[in-house]
Structure formats: C-alpha cells, structure tokens
Image (cartoon, grey):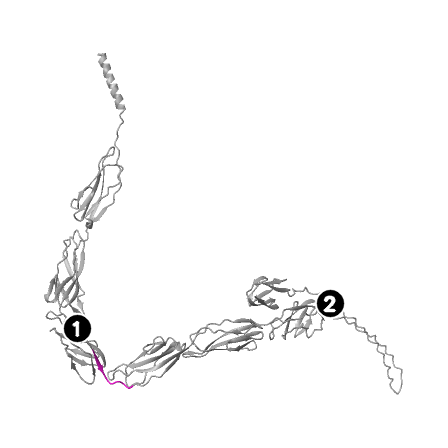
Amino acid sequence: MKKLIFSAAIVISSLSVGLASIPAVSASSTRLGSLSIISVSMDQKTITVTPPTSNSPGSWTISLDNPALASINGLTLTLKSVGAGQLTFTQAASGSYNSASRTTVFRVNPGHPTIGTFGPLTAPLTAGSYQITPPTSNSTGPWFYTLSNNVVDGRAIATLSGSVITLIDAGSVTVNAAQAATANYLLGSTSTTLTITALKPTIGAFPDLSISRDSVGVFSLKVPSSTSNGVWTFSSSSPAVATVTGTTVTPVGVGTTVISGYQAPNGGYGSATVKMNLSITSTAPTVGTLSPINFTLGTNSNSLVLVPPTSNSTGTWSFTVADPSIATVNGSTLSILKAGATTITAQQNPTTSFGYSAKVSTPLVVSAKAPIPTMPSLNQVVGDPAITIVPPSTSSTGTWSMSSSDSSVAAVSGLAITVGNAGTATITLTQAANGNWLANSTTFTVTVTGLVPTIGTLSPITLTLGTPVSPIPTPTSNSGGTWSYSISDPSIAKIVNGSLVGVAVGITTLSAVQKPAGKYGQSNTVQTQVTVKAAPVVTPTPGATPTPKPSVTPSPTPSPSKTVTPKPTVVPKPTHTSVPTPATPTPVVPLVSAKLVGHVLHISSNNPNVKVIINGADGKIGNNVVHPGTDLVIIEFGAKVIYSRVFSVK
C-alpha cells in the first residue's frame, strides 16, 4: 500500500515539471486602419479594392450587403448596376491574432455610354427622305435627333421629323444624335454629316444691265436658260434703286442694285443661283472745278475742310486721296500726315434727278520744315584754326548756309568759321527750301576765349586822408582792355568814380584785373599795398595887434580925445586832430596758382574759400583731371575773378 502511494506521487511530480516547461499561449488583438468611402463609375466595369491596414498577416475576404451592385471574386468587384451598399472587409485569424472586420460605403455611379461609330451619311435628293439608324451603345436610353447647318442663303435644304430627314435640296447638313440618360448611364451624344446629292443644272448667261431711269417705266427680266425645270424667283438688293415682282423690274432711283435669281430644285436637279448688276443711270450734273491746295505741315492742327466744286445737283460729295500716306480723308475733312504731293479727287453722288457727276481732281502739295537736330555750342581760343561745320542729316536735301551775329568774334565763310577776337557769337545754320521742304534754321554759340595778356606790376600806393588818387595807376599790358579795381578792406579805402579815396588810416590791398578786349581775355589779378595816412596838423600863426587910430577933435572947440586902449588879440588854440585807431583789416585777396603736369591741373590757394572753374564747370583746390585740348581756368574770390589762364593740354 505505501509503495503504490509513492509511485503515484512520483507520476504527479513528473507531470507538474513537464507542464511548467511549456510556455503559456495568449490571443493578440488585431488592429485595423480606417477606410474611406469607395465611389466608382460604371465606366470602370471592374475594381480591385485595397483592405485597410492591419498588424495581422491574416487573409482578407470582402462581402456586399447589396449583391445587385457587383459580383465578387477575391478582392475584385465586377460592377453590375448603379446604387450604394455596405462593403465589409474581414481578416481571418492568424497565429495569435484574432479575426477582425471593417465596413465602408460602396457607391456605384452612372457611367458614360460607349457609343459606336456614327459615320458620314449620303442620300440622293431623288430619295425624298432618309431614315436615321442610331449608332450602337451599351446604354438602353432612347435616341433623339436634331439638324444643324441645314439652311443655305435663307433656304432649308433638309428638315427633320423624329428620325426621318426630308430631303429638299442638294447640300450637306449636320445630324446630331443624343441618347437619353438611364439609371446606369449618363446622357451620350455624337454627330455626323449627311450629304444630299443631286444633279447640278447648267445655267445660261445673266448679264449686267444699265438703263436710264427716264427711258423705261418697267421692264421684264430675261430668265436665264437652264437644264432644270425648277421655278425661278428674283429679288433686288436695293429696293431704293429698283424693285422686282416676279420677273418685272421697276426702276425707282439712280444707283446700282444686285438682281439675284434662284431656281428651285426639280427632277433630280439641285437649286441654282445667279446674280447680275443693274445700274439705273440719270443725267450727270454740271460741276465746277477744285482749287489747288497748298498746305504747310504743322498749321491748323494738320487738317482742313474740303470745299466741293459748284454743282446744279444737291447730291453729296465723296473725296479720295491718291496717296493715303500723305493725307487721308473722312467725309470732307482732310487730315495731313506728311510732306509730299498727291491728288485729291471729288465725285458727286446721284440724286433722284441726277446721276453721278464726272470726277474732278486737283493737286495737293504739302510743305514742311525738315526738323534740324540741336547743334552743340563751341568753345574756342584765340588763334585756333578755322572750323568746318558738318550739317546734320535731315529729310530735306536743301543747301546749307551760315551767318554770324558778330564777325569780329567768329567770321563765317560758307560752312567754315574763322576765330577772331575774344567773345561770344551766335551762329545761324540755315537749310534752304527744296521740293516740299521749307527753309529751316537752327542756332548755336561760339565762345572764343582770349589770350591771357602780359601785364606788369603795381607799385605800392600811399595816400592821405582827404586827398584822393586819380587816376588809379595801371600796370603795363599788351591788351587794350579796361581795368577793374577792388579794395580788400573798404573801411580803409574805397574806389569812388574811378578815384582811390582814403577812408581811415590803415593798410589795405588794391586788386586790379584787366577786362577782355580784342584777342585778349581777362588778365590775371595784380595786387599792391595801399597805405592811408592822416592829413598833417596845421598850427595857425597868431595875428598882429591892431594899432588904434587917433580920434578927431570936433571944431570949433578942440578938446583932447580919449585914448582908446586896444583889446588884446585872441590867439586861437591849435586844434587837436585825433588819429583814428586802425580797424582790424579783413582778409586780403588770396594768393593762388595753377600748374599743369600731364593731364592733371594742380590748383593751390592760401584761402580755401576761392571758387575754381575749369571750362565752365566747377573745379577744386588740388588735382583736377583735364582732357586734351584747351582748358580755361578761372579762380574767383568774393564774386570777383582773381585768376584767369588758358592751358593747352596735349
């Protein structure tokens, strides 16, 4: 008994050990992604769907709650009808993953029908009608038809009733076919061409005709011959000129109209049309002449109103211009465009009493000034060689000439300018009239810079208050120009009416500049010192004591007269002349110089407030780059020229 119990315990213990070595298996959760609504068209016929995302490798199946929408084969659906239902994706369990499913909306929309070929159609006119056969289609919708391009010159060549086309005349029409929408298919359409064939009749002549309005009241048209027996009808394009009833024409007014004839289809022949010009004439009016027109471009807004010739008719006038590049006409207004010569023609239109007038022509001559481009001004130096002017290019071929406002500065000979004295002259360049071009001119200036004169020095000047110096001394010079003077300190001395007048005791500076004259330009500035001294003090000499004269004793009783005691003479005290304290002198004229080295002109000055001008443009103290030629340097101080010189740059 004990033995049996022990054996059982051993078995149980061994079983426990075996179970403990086998790992436990637990089910995992399958997680599916989201799905969007699936919308397809019947045009697609089949569709393969994609399951939602999943963390499981299990296989997929799909199912529809509405099997009428599509049949299923794996994940592929074959579309059968339009509608909507629930499409369910189911993933089978796999390993530790459980089964899961996801549902979305599955919608099938109507598609476009597949329409077969609707090829070109042909029918003979003699058939009278044509039955339309619809093209093939996978839709069951009914067909509807319309015609387009079936009217020619206002007349129908075919009509439609249902699917039957009535053939009226030869030609080509467009047949439009439309298939109505159904539950599964949208509206479909297509088109083709129906050609109606017929014989073409041979038509005889229908010539133009011209008659006088007063010659006949009415007349009959001669119907042209034809191989067809179709009925003819006629019409007039301008009833104000002539009307047509049947084949009877009634002239109404002077002018031209188009008579159109139409022969209807008949006996296998198509229709035919003919046209002829009918001119209704009348007596021409008696008209005068047109005066020649001469016009200058640029006047009267380049337009004028044409005055027609005299006439015994009241008809309106028409004007034409032979060369519309010179002028154009609108009504009676002539617009001038450019210089040139052309012809204007006028003709009077017909009235009820008169026909067209004879054409009247007159010449139109348009003249203009050829624009001359602006000529540059010239800057020359006395002694420069003569200059030959090359005239600018213009539209005119007129000859050129020149004139000068001052021949002493710039003398003109032909198109050459000879430089003379210093100064400025205005040159007028004129182009003579030629053809339709009037004379025109332009001007430019020639500025001639004179030579710098050679001048001497000024000696220092001493003057006394109250004693002016006149005339003011001048340096020696080879120029005949007048001299201009300035004082650096007008509180010490002034220049009054050409005289140097002292104002107060002190020292100042006199600057002298010689103005241009003849071949010489302005001189350099010459300076000297002016010393103003006080007038000398004059002490008056005392006068003599007067001697009294004896008194005369009256008669007859003489009495001794009193002796007059003379009063002492008052000796005047010397007047003390005060010497004014010299005023603080203002800055004197700066010392300046100019030196040319190569193409660099160096200007120096002991005062930075000077103004440097080189060839009319602002320069500077220091280095100035100059170009080959002549360069005029002027230095100013206080609005006065203190230096002037011409440099030749190679």
The quarter of the image holding the N terminus is top left
Q: Is residue 307 visible?
A: no
Q: Residue at x 18, y 60 (%)?
A: 191
Q: Left or right: 227 with respect to 631?
A: left
**Classed neighbour count for the residue bearing mark 2: other residues with Cα under 10 Å, few (<14), some (14–19), many (≥20):** few
Stretch in magenta: 277-286
Eyeballing the image, is 89 above or below 228?
above
387 vs 624, nearest the viewer: 387
Count of labels in the image? 2
> In terms of secondary structure, where does tag 2 sit?
loop
Residue found at the very far top of the displayed protein? 1
> Label 2: which residue?
579
Q: Is residue 165 magenta?
A: no
Contact? badges 1 and 2 (CB < 8 Å): no
Q: Which sits earlier in the primary sequence, circle 1 or circle 2?
A: 1
Q: Is residue 279 magenta?
A: yes
Q: Amino acid at mark 2?
A: Val
Please state the horizontal and vertical placement of residue 553, each as a whole percent of the image: 87, 84
Q: Amino acid at mark 1?
A: Thr
The quarter of the image holding the C terminus is bottom right
Residue found at the very far bottom of the displayed protein? 556
Q: Is residue 22 visible?
A: yes
82 vs 556, nearest the viewer: 82
Name the mark on residue 273: 1
Eyeballing the image, is 543 above or below 628?
below
